[in-house]
Image (cartoon, helix red, strand yellow):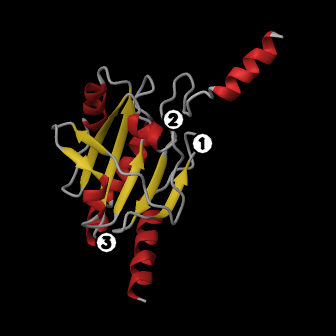
Amino acid sequence: MFLTILFSLLLTFPLPASKAGAPPNIGEKAPDFTLTTLQGKKVTLSERTAKSPVVLVVLRGYPGYQCPLCNVQVRDFLKNSAAFAKAGAQVILVYPGPGEKLDERAKEFLVDKQLPENFDLLLDPDYEFTNLYGLRWDAPKETAYPSTFLIDQKGKVFFAKVSKSHGGRTNAAELLDALAKQGTEKKM
């Protein structure tokens, strides 16, 4: 009897849908967001894509330590920063985590890195962006699935890679190749 009443209540008053989105697929419009740099500058995706293609990289943030694979990936991108600039791309690195001390953790992550003009590290306090993109890796010692999206000037995704492990990430060569192919396709 109780289960029948509970079931009919659930049908009458459904539970609210989860606020978590899903990662955008190739050909879909990337959900817009605004996040802040360590210097307090607000960055909005749609404003960036209106100017040039965007390389959107979701890091693991601080899952209790600075992720060594995130460090390797970002150093690879920094080593190739001139090639990204030549391709006309802006690189946005998203650093997710609990809001408390997130800026301190991000500063630790950047301690041995110099971001060029076409790179920004954005803070994602309390996983607002991560949930919007459906990338929350909600497990002990985890934060977000390492992911990369290439977004064109119309805001559409033309490359997407979501890793459900610590490895399997994109590298600069793979992204630069995808940017070059996109540029060639636009000219046709």
Q: Which residue is mark 2?
A: 136
Q: Residue at x 38, y 63 (%)?
A: 155
User: Of helix, strand and loop, which one carries label 3?
Assistant: loop
Q: Marks 1/2: CA distance?
A: 10 Å
Q: Residue at x 51, y 54 (%)?
A: 24
Q: Nearer the viewer, residue 41 or 64?
A: 41
- What label does residue 87 carry, if any? 3
Amino acid at dot 3: Ala
Place residue 110 in its image quadrant. Answer: top left
Q: Label 2 sits on what residue type?
A: Arg
Q: 74 above or below 154?
A: above
In percent of width and height, residue 83 lies at 31, 68
Say if 63 sits above or below 58 in the image: above
Q: Position of 107 compared to 12: left or right? A: left
Q: Which mark is residue 164?
A: 1
Q: In the rendering, at what x and y percent does residue 101 appear?
A: 29, 21
Going by the image, does 90 lie left or right of 171?
left
Q: Nearer the viewer, mark 2 or mark 3?
A: 2
